[in-house]
Amino acid sequence: MDKATRQEIVISAHSPYLKKTFTLTNEIWTYKILAMHGEVRNCRQFIQETIGSLDKASLIFRKKKDPNSIAVWKKCHYLNGMYEYIKIALHIEKADGGVIATAHGSNNLPTYDMEPLP
């Protein structure tokens, strides 16, 4: 994959609730998410829609030691019963946005190192 293809944006999702836009590059999608978490291969549109529809009732948590690291859990039927939730990890890089760092199936909700986003 050439550099231009790697840097191509495959998801750009704006969250009115978080007041930020998050992007996902082809490189992260292909070489990180799909290579390590193939269960989400049919979830690209679902990830985009989930970020765009976040609200007060959403399961949104941030790392206690890094408030710029946010994780979102959402029930996802595209995971074919293997997992109950999709976990989408977001990293805020600037005031108006950040990146989608990873996404994968999960049966567990947030752990002790995370706290609900206020």
Image (tube, rainbow, N blue to C red):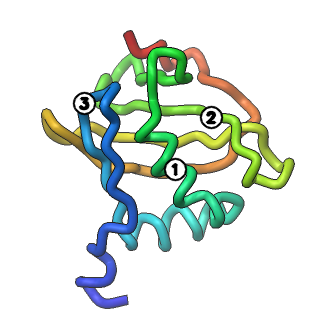
Name the secondary structure under disc 2. strand
User: Taking 54 as reference, is 107 left or right?
Assistant: right
In the picture as drawn, the residue positioned furthest to the left comes out as 95
User: Taking 87 as reference, is 4 left or right?
Assistant: left
Between 100 and 56, the one lying in front of the other is 56
In the picture as drawn, the residue positioned furthest to the bottom comes out as 2
The vertical placement of 78 against 25, above or below, is above
**First in residue order: circle 3 vs circle 2:** 3
Q: In which quarter of the image is the C terminus?
A: top left
Which numbered disc covers residue 70?
Answer: none
- Amino acid type, residue under disc 2 in the picture: Lys
* Residue topped by disc 2: 74
Residue drawn 41% across and 50% down? 101
Specify few, some or many for label 3: CA neighbours under 10 Å numbering under 14, 14-19, or 20 or more.
few
* Residue topped by disc 1: 47
* Residue topped by disc 3: 19
- Amino acid type, residue under disc 1 in the picture: Ile
Mark-to-mark CA distance, 2 and 1:
9 Å
